[in-house]
Image (cartoon, helix red, strand yellow):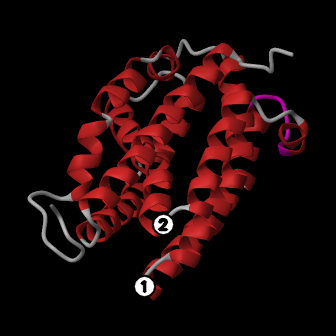
Amino acid sequence: MTTPGSSTARPYSEELWEAITPIHKAILDHPFITGLVDGTLPRAAFRHFIVQDSHYLRDYARALALCAAKAPGEEDVRAFASDAVGAIAAEQEMHAAFMADLGGSAGEAAALPVGPATRAYTSYLLATVYGGSFLDGLAAVLPCYWIYARVGAELLAESSPDPLYRRWIAAYGDESFQSVVRRVVSLADRTGAEATGAQRAHALGHFVTTSRYEWMFWDAAWREETWPV
């Protein structure tokens, strides 16, 4: 059994990614993602995504701030605090620009209801980061970094005939974003190496759950999900 501080046979990140390989493939095969690449994604679905993502990022920024509060080292505290600020900046700048291109505004997006998948995802995320260990919280927030980086890099190679979708792909395929993600994945390796086998397995469960929520988030946008009652 792994004990705290012991070395492991392989990096924790390999364990994590292996667990979500089928989810990652399902995301790449989802019609929302394939529609971004070939330009056939309906504007209404993309608009739904942007609106819900603006809601999501507000709570994601809170989750990152909580990770900063629990982080073991000063450098990690600063990094997560910076990422929290960056998440809010993305909501204010990038989403406002996309909404303008879609004929709306950031204020209009903020006034629209938080959807079921968004509410479920952010509620789970905040509950995990509040109530769990630092490793639990890190594992819960990691899919939003890592899956977007992987999807962005793979879509960047294919690009899109639609300039709006091409701009979204470029934002997540960009090296500046990729370097941030490498830093968080490296932190997961360091933190996982210091955890027990039971702690690693528990955190992995959160990682898989929020990865599933990532798929659900795109699927909700594709279906333009609303509350049933």
From the top left corner, tell me how far across and down residue 180 is, in percent. Answer: 41, 63
The answer to whether residue 182 is above or below residue 164 is below
User: Which image quarter holds the C terminus?
Assistant: top right
**Secondary structure beneath label 1:** loop
Read off the magenta span: 102-106
**Secondary structure beneath label 2:** loop
Q: Quadrant of residue 100?
A: top right
Q: Residue furthest bottom?
A: 74
Q: Which residue is mark 2?
A: 133
Separation of marks 2 and 1 at Cα, in angstroms: 15 Å
Drawn side of residue 183 relative to residue 64, left or right: left
From the top left corner, tell me how far across and down residue 72 is, in percent. Answer: 43, 81
| Label 2: few (<14), some (14–19) or many (≥20) C-alpha neighbours in 10 Å | some
Out of 103 and 15, give the one closest to the viewer. Answer: 15
Residue type, mark 1 in image: Gly
Labelled disc at residue 73: 1
Query: What residue sits 50% from the left and 28% below the top?
Result: 215
Drawn side of residue 226 relative to residue 126, left or right: right
From the top left corner, tell me how far across and down residue 99 is, in percent. Answer: 76, 36
Drawn side of residue 118 relative to residue 38, left or right: right
| Label 1: few (<14), some (14–19) or many (≥20) C-alpha neighbours in 10 Å | few
Residue 105 on the magenta span: yes
Residue 56 on the magenta span: no
